[in-house]
Image (cartoon, grey):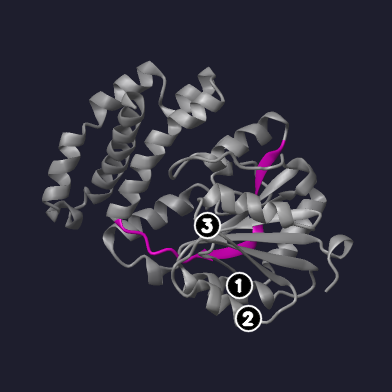
């Protein structure tokens, strides 16, 4: 297929050591009809069989880039640099598009050219069968469950796993690199928000989030987010960002008092509470405690 003007949407998918998932997602995109698109998968230094499995997918719309492991932002930036479409859709390697996904994004972007389209993702029950996974399912879906199509989601709506935007609205490169997980999407979103770009929900762009979350891995991510909050703030030193991230001295003092890690350690040591009615309250506390621990580590560092 010809590139350049023929391509309406460039789909950029970063991946690292998730061969089965990324191939499932790629195949789901390649059955899409009615949209001229290219699919750019950036293999960020995978050590599993990701290169071999992707090489067996023969489709002119698919390009695979390979780079040493440099992280999510670098992988997305590399894909963006190769994008030829008028629009770019950043999609994580565990976000499985449902039929009509790209057509919904394209229609949205044509109606709202100065906005960013946030996919309507859900977590299937098959990957949310245990306590924390069910809690996370409700938490992740709660923010958009009752939102109407094209509803503005606010600056926090840029915490995305699947988002489309006109290529000309994005800086080059789009993403600032962070040394750990967290806030790099918000950082780009903050810049876009300040230039008038609003994230809006695309109801028709339905997708399944296939990541099998667990408490321990999520706590590690939240702890990293706490550390990376300081990177975000140093890039944009302002009161709104300080309050948003929790690095403001008053916010940090409150979090230190309200979410002590010593209590989190006690909850993690004896987890019979997961079968009680208070389980969700404890899960919320643990996430806040992990984030606060990261904030304090970033402050000390």
- Nearer to us of marks 2 and 1 is 2
The residue carrying pointer 2 sits among few (fewer than 14), some (14 to 19) or many (20 or more) residues within 10 Å by Cα, namely few
The residue at 34%/59% (across/down) is 134
| Cα–Cα gap, marks 2 and 1 | 9 Å
Q: Secondary structure at mark 1?
A: helix
Instruction: Identify the residue under disc 3.
Output: 68
Q: Name the side, left or right, on which 141 lies relative to 256.
A: right
- Marks 3 and 2 sit apart, C-alpha to C-alpha, by 22 Å
- Per the image, label 2 sits on a secondary structure element best described as loop
Task: Sort mark 1 into few (<14), some (14-19) or many (20+) by Cα contacts within 10 Å.
Answer: many
From the top left corner, tell me how far across and down residue 76 is, in percent.
61, 52
Magenta-drawn stretch contains 200: yes
Q: Secondary structure at mark 3?
A: loop
Residue 77 placement (x, y as % from top left): 64, 49
Marks 2,1: beta carbons within 8 A: yes
Asked whether the viewer can see residue 258, the reply is yes
Query: Could one spot residue 148 in this view of the protein?
Result: no
Relative to 149, is 176 on the left or the right?
left
Residue receiving disc 1: 26
Numbered range of the magenta stretch: 197-214
Identified at 80% across, 72% down, the residue is: 34
* Earlier residue among tags 2 and 1: 1
Which residue lies under the disc numbered 2? 57
Do callouts 3 and 1 mark residues in contact (Cβ within 8 Å)? no
């Amino acid at each position: 297929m010809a590139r350049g003007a023929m391509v309406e949407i460039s789909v950029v998918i970063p991946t690292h050591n998730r061969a089965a998932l990324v191939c499932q997602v790629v195949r789901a995109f390649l059955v899409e009809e009615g949209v001229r698109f290219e699919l750019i998968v950036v293999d960020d230094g995978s050590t599993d069989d990701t290169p071999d499995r992707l090489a067996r997918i023969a489709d002119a719309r698919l390009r695979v880039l390979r780079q040493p492991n440099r992280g999510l932002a670098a992988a997305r930036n590399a894909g963006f640099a190769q994008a030829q479409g008028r629009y770019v859709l950043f999609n994580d390697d565990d976000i499985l598009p449902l039929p009509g996904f790209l057509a919904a994004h394209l229609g949205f972007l044509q109606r709202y050219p100065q906005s960013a389209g946030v996919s309507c993702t859900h977590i299937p029950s098959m990957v949310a069968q245990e306590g924390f996974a069910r809690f996370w399912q409700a938490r992740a879906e709660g923010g958009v469950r009752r939102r109407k199509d094209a509803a503005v989601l606010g600056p926090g709506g840029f915490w995305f796993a699947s988002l489309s935007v006109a290529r000309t609205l994005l800086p080059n490169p789009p993403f600032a690199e962070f040394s750990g997980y967290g806030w790099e999407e918000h950082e780009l979103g903050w810049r876009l928000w300040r230039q008038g770009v609003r994230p809006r929900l695309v109801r028709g762009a339905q997708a399944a989030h296939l990541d099998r979350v667990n408490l321990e891995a999520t706590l590690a991510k939240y702890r990293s987010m706490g550390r990376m909050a300081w990177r975000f703030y140093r890039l944009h030193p302002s009161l709104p960002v300080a309050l948003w991230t929790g690095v403001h001295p008053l916010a940090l003092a409150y979090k230190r008092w309200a979410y002590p890690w010593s209590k989190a350690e006690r909850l993690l040591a004896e987890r019979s509470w997961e079968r009680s009615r208070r389980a969700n309250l404890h899960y919320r506390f643990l996430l806040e405690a992990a984030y606060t621990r990261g904030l304090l580590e970033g402050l000390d560092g």
